[in-house]
Amino acid sequence: SKFVNEKWMIKNGFLNDVQEHKPWWWNIKVQKLNLSAPLILLPEVSCQKAVEILQEKGYDQAPVVAESGLILGMVTLSNTLTSMLAGNVEFSDPVTKVTYDQFSKISLEDSLGKLSCILENDHFAIVVHEQMQFDGNGSSFMKQMVFGVVTATDLLTFVSRNDKK
C-alpha cells in the first residue's frame, strides 16, 4: 500500500522526510536551482508545430498550459515524434493528443530532498508558483503558474557544481 511507502508519503506531502543521513543539499529549496523560464505550449498547437518549436528552441519537453492557466500536462519531443511516426496521431492533431496528464508538481519552497524523491520515479517535475488573483468582483482565487521544469540532470548539475566535500 502507498500509505506505508515512506517515499510516496514524502512525495505527496503527507510526511516530512525523516532520513537520518541526509546529503548536504537535502534541505536546500528548489528555488536555488536557478531554473530558466520554461517554454509553454498552448493546447491548440499542432503536433507538427510542437516538434518544430521544441527542436528549434532546443527543448526536450514543455508544459501544455491552457489560456486560463490550467496546467494540462507535459509534452515530450520523443513521445510526440514516436506517436507521429507510428501513425497514432496526425501531424495536424492538437498537441493535447500526446500530452502526459500524469505529472508531479513541486513548489519553489519545497526541498531538493522532496524533489529527489519525486525524480526517483518521474523523469521530470513541473515547478509551480501559486499566485493570488482577483476577478472583477473582488473575489480572490489561487492560480498556479508554471515556473519551470526540473529534471534529474538539473539536480545533479546543481549538486556537482556546489559539492561541499
Image (cartoon, rainbow, N blue to C red):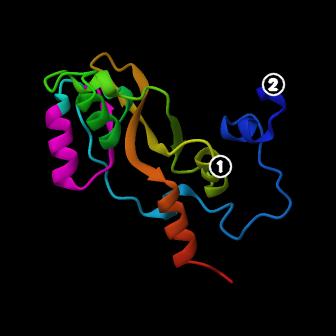
119 relative position to 137: left or right: right
Residue shown at the point (26%, 46%) measured from the top left: 39
Front of the two marks 2 and 1:
2
Foreground: 31 or 10? 10
Q: Position of residue 93 (x, y in %)?
A: 19, 21
SS at mark 2 in the image: loop
Q: Position of residue 114 (x, y in %)?
A: 65, 49
Residue shown at the point (77%, 45%) measured from the top left: 16
**Residue found at the far top of this picture:** 137
Magenta span has 54? yes
Amino acid bearing label 2: Ser
Foreground: 136 or 44? 44
Return the mark for residue 87. none
Residue shown at the point (66%, 48%) measured from the top left: 117
Neighbor class of circle 2 (other Cα within 10 Å; few <14, some 14-19, many 20+) is few
- State the residue position of label 1: 114
Amino acid bearing label 1: Lys
